[in-house]
Image (cartoon, rainbow, N blue to C red):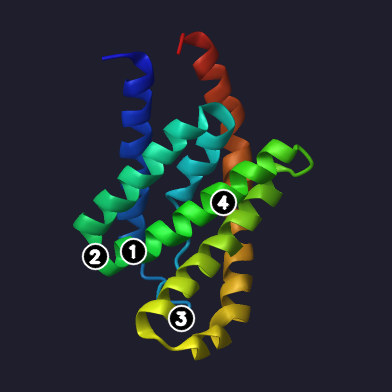
């Protein structure tokens, strides 16, 4: 097994552990589906230390496995919509180089919630769900900020460790 595949497997495992821990944390923001997003730490760090296609693979595998183990088909659909939209926006913002990791993370958190809201409105066929948008924007910004702070503290250590190994 190549070192890159092993590294991606480790990141998938870490994201799954964060997903499981999040299931155990009884946090209720009053709106269905609003979570802290601990697994996004892995995705954000991945954006800064590995190739985007590997981050995409990690994100997709994590969403599917988490949905199968801790959710259902609808949680996979919501997470996939939010996760993929978030990943695209964060990758574009990172590439622009005018945004800090925290700014990229906040945008990712906000856009993730927008993606999930769009899917919810389409599935339920009720566009009045848009009334949740202000709360979802705030929740995404707050959780994105927290994930950004945590990730920005971890990236230097990951980069140092990766320099020791050839990937």
Q: Mark 4 near mark 1, Cβ–Cβ under 8 Å?
A: no
Identify the residue at image location x=39%, y=60%.
79
Q: Mark 2 near mark 3, Cβ–Cβ under 8 Å?
A: no
Q: Earlier in the sequence, mark 2 or mark 3?
A: 3
The Cα–Cα distance between marks 1 and 2, rounded to whole angstroms, is 6 Å
Percent of width and height locating residue 140: 58, 65
Q: Closer to the observer: label 2 or label 3?
A: 2
Q: Mark 4 near mark 2, Cβ–Cβ under 8 Å?
A: no
To which residue does mark 3 refer?
Answer: 31
Quadrant the C terminus occupies? top left
The answer to whether any part of residue 107 appears in the image is yes
Quarter of the view holding residue 61? top left
Quarter of the view holding residue 49? top right
The Cα–Cα distance between marks 4 and 2, rounded to whole angstroms, is 26 Å
Label 3: how many residues lie within 10 Å, few (<14), some (14-19) or many (20+)?
A: few
Q: Secondary structure at mark 3?
A: loop
To which residue does mark 4 refer?
Answer: 147
To which residue does mark 2 refer?
Answer: 73
The Cα–Cα distance between marks 4 and 3, rounded to whole angstroms, is 20 Å
To which residue does mark 1 refer?
Answer: 77
């Amino acid at each position: 097994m190549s070192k890159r595949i092993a590294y991606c497997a480790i990141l998938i495992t870490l994201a799954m552990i964060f997903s499981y821990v999040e299931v155990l944390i009884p946090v209720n923001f009053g709106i269905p589906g609003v979570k802290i997003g601990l697994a996004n730490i892995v995705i954000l760090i991945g954006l800064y230390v590995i190739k985007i296609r590997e981050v995409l693979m990690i994100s997709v595998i994590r969403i599917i496995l988490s949905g199968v183990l801790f959710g259902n088909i609808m949680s996979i659909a919501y997470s996939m919509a939010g996760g993929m939209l978030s990943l695209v926006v964060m990758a574009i913002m990172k590439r622009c180089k005018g945004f800090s990791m925290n700014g990229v993370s906040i945008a990712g958190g906000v856009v993730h919630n927008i993606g999930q809201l769009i899917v919810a409105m389409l599935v339920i066929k009720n566009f009045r769900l848009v009334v949740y948008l202000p709360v979802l924007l705030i929740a995404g910004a707050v959780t994105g900020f927290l994930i950004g702070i945590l990730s920005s503290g971890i990236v230097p250590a990951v980069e140092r460790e990766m320099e020791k190994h050839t990937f």
